[in-house]
Image: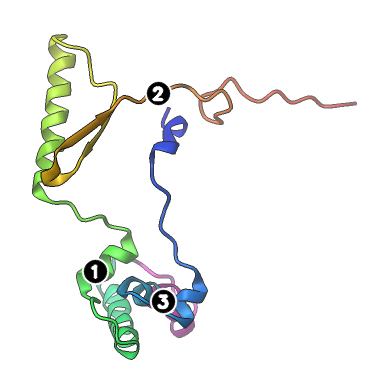
Amino acid sequence: CFQCTMWLFPPQTNFPLCTLAETPRSAAHCIEYAHLIQWGQDRTGESFDADSAEHMKWVFERALVRAEQYGISGVTYTHTQGVVKNIIPAIPSTNAVVAAVCTLEALKIATVCSPGMNNYMLYVGSSGVYTHTVAYERDPDCPCCSAGVRLEVGA
């Protein structure tokens, strides 16, 4: 199941609040400060909507002011959206490679001409494609697909 393969995903990037509040060193720090700290201070009681253009513009403007205070460049509206929404930029060639691999796997399933891909594939732009076989095994302690956890209750 998906839960059993969570170890394949990299950990989320989080910034310590002390770095955001005291010593921002990058445009992302300024954006996160405006999003996580200034929003709650200046717009008390209003929940942040990442899909609202007005909310995103507000965060962008505050992040831009903070970046200028600390001499940090790189705060753009697009970068603000990327940081707030955790968007990973994709390039057309990556999408083309993924589409080609999906099509090839669908062809294998439909025609049974070859076994399906049983591995991990990493596409590295112009450097090439790296594949590594990963054995997907059921985790016996998985809360989603295991038989369950034995629980003994004393009387």
Three-letter amino acid code of the residue under disc 2: Tyr
Q: Is there CB contact under 8 Å for labels 1 and 3?
A: no
Looking at the rendered structure, the kind of residue marked 3 is Tyr
Q: Which mark is residue 79?
A: 1
Q: Residues within 10 Å of mark 1 (few under 14, many from 20)?
A: some
Residue in the foreground of this view, choosing between 97 and 25 = 25
Q: Quadrant of the C terminus?
A: top right
| Residue type, label 1 | His
Q: Which residues are magenta?
A: 34-49
Is residue 47 left or right of 119 when viewed as pictured? right
Q: Quadrant of the N terminus?
A: top left
Q: Residue 96: horizontal and vertical position, in percent? A: 9, 40
Q: CA distance from mark 3 to mark 2?
A: 39 Å
Residue appearing at x 12%, y 37% in the figure: 97
Determine if the magenta segment contains residue 48: yes
Q: Earlier in the sequence, mark 3 or mark 2?
A: 3
**What number is the disc on residue 33?**
3
Write down the quadrant of residue 127 in the picture: top left
Which residue is located at x 43 percent, y 70 percent? 47
- The tag earlier along the polypeptide, 2 or 1, is 1
Q: Is residue 77 magenta?
A: no
Mark 2 and mark 1 in contact? Answer it, CB < 8 Å.
no
Q: Position of residue 100 (x, y in %)?
A: 10, 32
Precedes in sequence: disc 1 or disc 3: 3
Q: Which of the two discs, 2 and 1, sits closer to the camera?
A: 2
Q: Which residue is mark 2?
A: 136
